[in-house]
Image: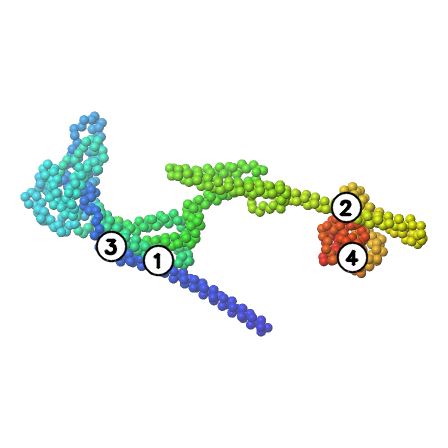
Amino acid sequence: MDIKLKSSNDNKEFNDSRNNINGIKKSNYKGKVVIAILLVIAIIATAALGMCAAYPLIEENAKNVSYNNYFEEYAFSENLAGALYCSYYNSLNEKAGGTLDPASTLLNIPQNIYDNDEDYEESEFINGFNSNFNNWNRILDNQLANLKYYSYDKTNNITKTNINYEVGIIENNIDLSSIKKDEYQFYVAINFDENGNLTINDIKGANIQNFEYYLNSALSDFLSDNYYDSGYYNATMNPIKNMEFVYAVPNNLVFNDSISWGIRNAEAYGYELVGGVAVMIIATLVAIAALIFPIKRANEMPLFKWISKIPFEIWIVIVSLTVALLIVSSSYMIHPALNGQLEHFVGFNVDWFTASEKVIWVLNFINWFIGFAIVFFAVLIIKYIFNLGIKEYFKRRTIFGIILMFFVTIIKKTLDEVTKVDLKEKNNKLIIKLLLINALILLIITSIWFFGIPVVILYSIVLFFVIRKYVDKISEKYSKLREATSKIAQGKLDVNIEEDLGLFEPFKEDLKEIQKGFKKAVDEEVKSQKMKTDLISNVSHDLKTPLTAIITYADLLKGENLSEEKRKQYVDTLDRKAQRLQVLIEDLFEMSKATSGNITLNIENIDVVALMKQTLLELEDKLEEAKLSVRKNMPEGKVILPLDSQRTFRVFENLVINMTKYAMPNSRVFIDIFENENDVQIVMKNMAAEEITFNVDTIAERFVRGDESRNTEGSGLGLAIAKSFVELQNGKFNISVDGDLFKVTIIFEK
């Protein structure tokens, strides 16, 4: 008992130890995953912080990169042209007491040469110009909110300005020396004489020739750029006369208008170029870190498990957009962050939020963190592709591959059905299925219009190779079938076709049946030939032996000097040999009748128990002579079966005689009769005197004897006759051997 308790405690301690080890392993695994996640976060966060730390250096280098001057662009001149016309009209309208409309003041429309219907259309054009011009005037107040101006109408001595200090007028001209040019990054003084000729008196922040060229172009194209149907009426803008203007853009822009956007866009080139280089350097370092990072640890991270399932095409879009946004972010994030102007980043005025520079830097950090995280995981995805296998990844993780494999699977399945089609049956359903699949694919392809043409070509090429592959496969299977049939035709009946022949699979089964039939026929023929040879040999031997004895003793009886005793002895021998010859001939006749089926059975209800007892009684002398002890196991009552009593007795007799010949002397033989529900079994067993070396399957054939030397009396027909008579009566005759135990089982159905 103590030992059992100790063993139980040991098992408990072992299980506890194993559970502790498993717990430690799980804990270590979780710990490794957490460390891997923290390491990834640290790598990406370091890259994002490094990018933010590089802002001052990026700004310094961006200023040294040449970029377009916004004030020398047509867009700025176009806005300035609108401002000039608006200022000119407002000055004239103020002088006239607000009675003028823009069209009558600014437009020049020739005397109408068309009919009255078109006069109506001309008035519509004029009304539209007036309405649009007034809207334009209001729009300019918003689009050019950062623009400082001073206009002077020399004819009417009217000035208008939004400059917050006094500007002087000397000798009917603006005193340009009174302009505080240091406060402005751009400044220009424009003069129109009495003939409308434009002159640039002074300029800062732009090349005078470039600026003058674009401004003249914008003034001449103002009407056509803003009113597309003006050319239909040959309308032109009246020139601005006797006006002087000063326009300036402050160093510090307060409003988020077209000027601030234009300047920032012009400067964006430098920030994009230098910032893009910085982004690429840091992104390269992130990519190298991702290459070094073990893919095994990446596969353990839940986030990467989810990311790795995203189709490759979507990854391409994400990475492309990320790279583009990272480069663009160099201009749209770095400059606002350095200047603390969040409104330039988000795209609308948020003055109440600009004071929080920390928020700006947090947004920048988040932007770079997300961007570099995508770069990091993109590189891990590339490693994952090679780890999984390009072919396998293409099939499982690409939209094109998934769709392609879907259609390939359908095509393969259908083609497999084609290769395995039963040619004996109608296959209309299969043909319709093939046509529907092809129609569906073509319908999908044609739905993408022009781009469907290359897809159709690609589809045709793929279909060609797929069909050729299956045709080659069918040809290969046909060749194997033809080769097998040729070998069978040459007499090689052991040909075996293991592989699936697809379309020709039914023929393979038929071929196997033909092989079996041929082999059976050949085996039967060989067996028949052997039996004929054995029959001639055995019959010759068995007939010759008693016949020779008869002839010999007949010659001896002719002797005149024979004593009566000798004569009597010779006569007895002659009689015995003659009876043996008679039995042999009778057996031959019986066997011949049984084999040919030319025998008449007299079926009647007989008691097989009584018939067996009668047989044993009649052969009692032979059993005693062979020194055999019979052990019977039979029902006490009758066992009635519909049998031919004479042939059944012959069966029992032959089997008992067979025992007396071949059973071991001084041994027991067993005869059992079992009555079952549906049949009756008769079992006869004996221990062989000699070692059993014969073939159990052939021992019941004609002239086959257990004594191959044929030293014992007999014809070798006893078991064959017994088997034939049993089978003629619809019974079963089985012989089995267990060592030297010889067993015969007869089964008769009730």
Task: Residue 61: give x, y in percent of width and height.
Answer: 22, 54
Badge nearest the viewer, 2 or 3: 2
x then y, percent, for residue 402: 44, 46
The colour scheme used here is rainbow
Residue for badge 1:
289
Three-letter code, disc 3: Ile
Find disc 4 in the rendering and name its residue: 663
**Left or right for 594, reference 491:** right
Q: Disc 2 versus disc 4: distance between alpha carbons?
A: 28 Å
Residue 501 image offset from top left, x and y in percent: 56, 43
CB atoms of marks 2 and 1 within 8 Å: no
Secondary structure under the numbered disc 2 in the rendered image:
helix
Q: Residue furthest top?
A: 115
Measured Cα–Cα span from mark 3 to mark 1? 24 Å
Q: Earlier in the sequence, mark 2 or mark 4?
A: 2
Indicate the secondary structure of the residue bearing disc 1: helix
Q: Secondary structure at mark 3?
A: helix
